[in-house]
Image: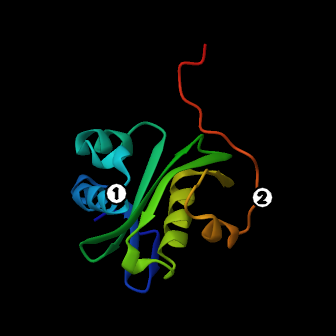
């Protein structure tokens, strides 16, 4: 299956493998997030790209959630995406994904943007900062 980082009440957090893709795409579709769901082959390339660490929360063979992060391997980690199945929320799965992700990616902090999960991130040790999502063209 992949290296176990955390075990939380029957949930394993492991490195992404191709067989997880259908479950990840289904979670994204359920959440209404098209970026990964609209093209599964592109999603696989994203989740295996250089500098990307992707981790998956499993209960046996069921994908309960996933996170993908980008990192310099030493200091900076950026959380690009995290999702947990609705039925599994508030059970520690997202925290386990973050912990497993940063351990695998390397780094001392995670930066992120969110427009849906402020209460969750507020519950973690954090420093709130201003951020932007910018789009080209930049001229």
Residue at figure coordinates x 33%, y 72% from the top left:
58
The disc placed on residue 81 is: none
Residue 123 coordinates in the image, percent (x, y) = 68, 73
Residue nearest the viewer, comparing 32 with 51: 32
Residue at figure coordinates x 55%, y 71% from the top left:
95
* Type of colouring: rainbow
Residue at figure coordinates x 27%, y 44% from the top left:
38
Q: In the rendered image, which residue does mark 1 sit on?
A: 28
Residue 103 coordinates in the image, percent (x, y) = 56, 59
Mark 1 secondary-structure assignment? helix
Q: Is residue 129 above or below residue 13?
A: above
Q: In the rendered image, which residue does mark 2 sit on?
A: 127
For the residues labelled 2 and 1, the Cα–Cα distance comes to 28 Å
Residue at figure coordinates x 37%, y 41% from the top left:
46
Q: Which part of the image, by quadrant, shows the C terminus?
A: top right
Residue nearest the viewer, comparing 1 with 68: 68
- The extreme bottom residue here reads 9
Mark 2 surroundings within 10 Å by alpha-carbon count, few (fewer than 14), some (14 through 19), many (20 or more):
few
Determine contact: label 2, label 1, CB under 8 Å.
no
- The extreme top residue here reads 139
Judged left or right of residue 19, residue 130 is: right
Mark 1 surroundings within 10 Å by alpha-carbon count, few (fewer than 14), some (14 through 19), many (20 or more):
many
Q: Nearer the viewer, mark 2 or mark 1?
A: 1
Mark 2 secondary-structure assignment? loop
Residue 60 coordinates in the image, percent (x, y) = 27, 77
* 2 or 1: tag closer to the N-terminus: 1
């Amino acid at each position: 299956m992949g290296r176990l980082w955390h075990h939380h009440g029957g949930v394993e957090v492991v490195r992404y493998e191709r067989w997880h893709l259908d479950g990840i795409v289904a979670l994204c579709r359920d959440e209404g997030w098209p970026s990964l769901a609209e093209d599964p082959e592109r999603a696989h390339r994203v989740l295996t790209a250089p500098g990307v660490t992707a981790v998956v929360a499993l209960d046996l063979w069921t994908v309960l959630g996933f996170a993908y992060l980008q990192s310099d391997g030493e200091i900076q980690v950026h959380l690009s995406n995290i999702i947990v199945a609705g039925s599994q929320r508030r059970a520690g799965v997202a925290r386990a994904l973050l912990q497993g992700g940063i351990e695998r990616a390397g780094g001392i902090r995670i930066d992120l943007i969110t427009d849906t999960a402020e209460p969750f991130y507020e519950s973690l040790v954090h420093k709130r900062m201003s951020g932007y999502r910018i789009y080209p063209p930049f001229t």
